[in-house]
């Protein structure tokens, strides 16, 4: 229960769609979503595979609580070998698509092979078929969504699709569902494009059952109340979204600015959550239209925004006048602070384009920031950029390049490689703010030390969502630690990583963890899922997943040497703010972290550790 | 005191907790398709609008039903479908001007909101009070109060 115990296997090479039973032995060890799908991937592919070859597989996975009445039950993840990173990729998304897949009666879809010509998958409950998508190829995510809704005459069809960037091999393409929710990172959309798979359209009428409904509803009700009573999940996030952080992180001197040369941004307040509420522009209305929930979510952090009709980006372009998914903190940072641009409408427009054409705003923003630095050094020329000066602070450069990356045209093709390959091309690999090929997000590890270890050890390349120690170091959740100290961070990172891996396997959203700990998940999981789900079992599950992902990466060719940070964070001290004079103390934290993990000094899990975790 | 479901679309976030609570309460399954309350999302305007039966005093569905399967619950005022009498002719679904009575293929009967016997699950599940269950004579009370508040008159009365 919780699970439907059914997997849909789609062989794109042969065109077959075959149901098969979910491996319940593995479900007992890995629960669902992130954990369970990673297990499948590890068992079914050679981790050395070229991510863009037909031999790579791609799994859309829900959790046992996806589609239930538990708060935030919207989540699904896409698990594959990442096009950007060559490492394990696991990108999580909300919206309505994941729950609909569950309602159709499926826990997972495993895609293998490659279609000879473009196709999309249509699922209506048990019935699944691949249909031609030649006419959709070359269309944006938004156009694809509209065409499929019309074609199938079903307003409640939920669609997940790639845009042109994913078709054309932009290495950080994402998969966008429900128009503006994305499995965003590591190039999972690029993998989808390489398989000639344009979209998945799903409609489900079967619903979801749980093991003990009465106990489940009781637990769900109590835990919803905990979210409502918490200052972050009950007030901060619904009012300002994740953008509640912009001014806070700038204050503490941890807002990477101008390709992380600085740690504070003068224009931060202009692009903050507060600014989104301020009336502005030709109609004197705020950027923010409303907040919006994903399926089942009682927090509702999502932003729905509009670009001012008279803004240069959309003037005379009514197709961009509607309300759509607005700025989240990470995107506001990457498109804004990291490029030095403080024009809120320009950032909102660039973010719209990221959703419309399906690519990751974090990597895009950080890549254009690196390009701006290379331009400043005279290494990228006006000739290459098509006459557009790539200057820090230039909104025009940002929005023009956003459109070019979306279609993979002109200099957009070069930017579509991501910052690592871009900086290598121009002879300055050290200017790429990435780890394992993936750009780090909106927290500077000189001002928030734990985030350095977080980025360095994240299995999917630099990422904040693998161990969000910001919660402890800045917000004091579950307890306050000093953001400038390295002591104790190894343990903190490990604890957050393990708990997060467990949460990402339930079907619920990580943002609940501002208010919930594993103790709050436990009664919900236990009432929903077959078997007995104790707290110990959930914690061990997280640690097992973390080590399994590590095994995948090691088999793919990564070593302890890849657990590092860009030189800038280790050698160039923060120039202003509370962290002034500080670099990140990774070299102190890393050995302790390895030890706590039960890994040898090279970062390899010992035989003992693997055995303890049943790996 | 009779009470009414009162809907404030401006407070709705589109979370569908109400739809799940409804399907669970009535069908024992989490399945929005089986919900008697529906939330419509007008994506391009960022609007979310929950919609369900308003329990008309003089109900079209009830008047149209040839088998008298739609009956009034004297306590709640809800128009309830008596499944034993319903023959699935769907005349009520045509008669209802708002579309809130619907046919259920699985049972061959119609389904509509019955106020959960006086304790509506949707209102309890809604995290934002977009759906409330209020004194039927005073469903406009909160709106009146907020307009009254906007008059912003200075108190001058002296003790
Ligand atoms: S539960 Fe409330 S906020 Fe959520 S969709 Fe229903 S009416 Fe809207």
Image (spheres, coloured by chain):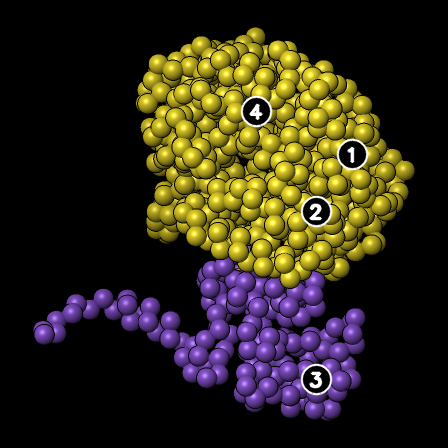
Chain colours: A yellow, B purple
Q: How far is disc 4 from disc 1 in space, using C-alphas? A: 23 Å
Chain under label 4?
A
Q: How far is disc 3 from disc 2 in space, using C-alphas? A: 41 Å
Q: Residue at left 67%, top 89%?
A: B64
Task: State which tag comes first along the sequence, 4 or 2.
Answer: 4
Q: Does the residue labelled 3 lie within 8 Å of ligand 1?
A: no
Q: How far is disc 4 from disc 2 in space, using C-alphas? A: 34 Å
In the rendered image, which residue does mark 1 sit on? A40
**Which residue is more in the foreground, A354 or A448?**
A448
In the rendered image, which residue does mark 2 sit on? A532
- In the rendered view, tell whether residue B75 sits above or below residue A39: below
In the rendered image, which residue does mark 4 sit on? A462
Chain under label 2?
A
Residue A314 appears at what percent x and percent y?
48, 43
Q: Residue at left 63%, top 26%?
A: A460
Q: How far is disc 1 from disc 3 in space, using C-alphas? A: 49 Å
Residue A237 appears at what percent x and percent y?
45, 46
Secondary structure under badge 3?
loop
Same chain, marks 4 and 3?
no
In the rendered image, which residue does mark 3 sit on? B82
Q: Looking at the image, is mark 2 or mark 1 nearer the viewer? A: 2
Badge 4: how crowded within 10 Å, few (<14), some, or many (20+)?
many
Would residue A225 appear left or right of A24 to someone viewing this image?
Answer: left
Same chain, marks 3 and 2?
no
Q: Looking at the image, is mark 4 or mark 2 nearer the viewer? A: 2
Residue B145 appears at what percent x and percent y?
33, 71
Would residue A45 appear left or right of A371 to someone viewing this image?
Answer: right
Q: Looking at the image, is mark 3 or mark 2 nearer the viewer? A: 2
Q: Does the residue labelled 1 lie within 8 Å of ligand 1?
A: no
Kindly tell me whether residue B33 is visible in this rendering. no
Residue B15 appears at what percent x and percent y?
56, 56
For residue A392, what is the image quadrant? top left
């Amino acid at each position: 229960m919780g699970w439907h115990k059914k997997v849909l296997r789609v062989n794109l090479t042969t065109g077959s769609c075959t149901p098969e039973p979910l491996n319940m032995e593995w479900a007992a060890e890995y629960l669902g979503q992130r954990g369970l799908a990673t297990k499948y991937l590890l068992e079914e592919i050679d981790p050395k595979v070229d991510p863009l070859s037909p031999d790579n597989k791609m799994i859309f996975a829900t959790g046992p609580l996806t589609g239930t009445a538990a708060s935030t039950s919207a989540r699904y993840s896409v698990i594959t070998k990442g096009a950007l990173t060559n490492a394990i990729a696991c990108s999580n998304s909300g919206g309505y698509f994941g729950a609909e897949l569950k309602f159709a009666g499926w826990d997972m879809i495993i895609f293998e092979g490659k279609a000879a010509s473009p196709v999309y998958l249509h699922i209506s409950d048990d019935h699944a078929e691949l249909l031609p998508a030649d006419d959709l190829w070359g269309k944006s995510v938004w156009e694809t969504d509209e065409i499929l809704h019309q074609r199938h005459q079903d307003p409640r069809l939920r669609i997940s699709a790639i845009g042109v960037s994913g078709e054309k091999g932009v290495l950080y393409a994402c998969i966008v569902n429900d128009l503006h929710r994305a499995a965003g990172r590591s190039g999972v959309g690029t993998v989808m494009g390489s398989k000639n798979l344009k979209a998945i359209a799903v409609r489900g009428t079967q619903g979801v059952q749980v093991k003990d409904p009465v106990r489940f509803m009781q637990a769900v009700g109590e835990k919803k109340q905990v979210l409502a009573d918490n200052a972050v999940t009950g007030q901060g996030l619904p009012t300002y979204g994740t953008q509640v952080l912009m001014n806070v992180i700038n204050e503490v001197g941890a807002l990477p600015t101008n390709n992380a040369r600085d740690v504070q941004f003068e224009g931060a307040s202009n692009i903050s959550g507060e600014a989104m509420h301020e009336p502005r522009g030709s109609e004197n209305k705020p950027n923010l239209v409303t907040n919006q929930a994903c399926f089942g979510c009682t927090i509702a952090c999502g932003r729905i925004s509009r670009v001012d009709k008279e803004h240069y980006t959309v003037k005379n372009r009514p197709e961009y006048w509607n309300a759509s998914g607005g700025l989240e903190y990470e995107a506001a940072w990457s498109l804004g602070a990291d490029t030095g641009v403080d024009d809120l409408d320009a950032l909102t427009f660039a973010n719209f384009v990221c959703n419309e054409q399906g690519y990751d705003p974090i990597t895009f923003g950080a890549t254009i920031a690196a390009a701006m630095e290379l331009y400043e050094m005279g290494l990228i020329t006006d000739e290459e950029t098509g006459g557009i000066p790539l200057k820090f602070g230039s909104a025009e450069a940002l929005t023009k390049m956003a459109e070019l990356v979306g279609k993979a045209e002109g200099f957009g093709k070069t930017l579509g490689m991501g910052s690592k390959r871009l900086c290598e091309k121009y002879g300055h690999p050290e200017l790429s703010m990435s780890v394992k090929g993936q750009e780090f997000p909106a927290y500077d590890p000189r001002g928030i030390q734990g985030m350095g270890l977080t980025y360095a050890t994240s299995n999917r390349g630099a990422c904040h969502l693998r161990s969000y120690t910001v919660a402890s170091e800045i917000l004091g959740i579950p307890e306050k630690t000093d953001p400038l100290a390295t002591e104790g961070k190894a343990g903190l990172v490990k604890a957050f990583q393990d708990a997060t891996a467990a949460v990402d396997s339930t079907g619920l959203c990580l943002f609940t963890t501002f208010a919930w700990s594993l103790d709050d998940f436990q009664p919900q999981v236990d009432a929903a899922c077959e078997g007995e789900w104790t707290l110990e079992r959930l914690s061990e599950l997280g640690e097992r997943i973390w080590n399994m992902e590590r095994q995948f990466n090691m088999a793919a060719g990564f070593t302890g040497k890849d657990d590092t940070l860009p030189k800038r964070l280790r050698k160039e001290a923060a120039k202003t703010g509370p962290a002034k004079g500080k670099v990140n103390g990774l070299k102190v934290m890393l050995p302790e972290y390895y030890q706590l993990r039960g890994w040898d000094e090279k970062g390899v899990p010992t035989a003992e550790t693997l055995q303890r975790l049943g790996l | 005191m009779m009470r009414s479901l009162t809907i404030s679309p401006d407070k709705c976030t589109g979370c569908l907790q109400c739809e799940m609570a409804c399907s669970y309460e009535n069908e024992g399954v989490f399945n929005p398709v089986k919900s008697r309350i529906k939330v419509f999302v007008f994506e391009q305007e960022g609007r979310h609008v929950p919609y369900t039966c308003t329990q008309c005093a003089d109900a079209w569905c009830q008047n149209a039903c040839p088998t008298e399967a739609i009956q009034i619950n004297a306590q709640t005022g809800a128009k309830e479908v008596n499944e034993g009498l319903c023959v699935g002719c769907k005349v009520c679904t045509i008669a209802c001007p708002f579309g809130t009575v619907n046919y259920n293929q699985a049972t061959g009967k119609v389904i509509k909101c019955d106020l959960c016997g006086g304790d509506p699950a949707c209102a309890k599940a809604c995290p934002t009070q977009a759906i409330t269950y209020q004194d039927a004579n005073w469903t406009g009370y909160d709106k009146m109060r907020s307009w009254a508040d906007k008059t912003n008159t200075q108190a001058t009365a002296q003790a």
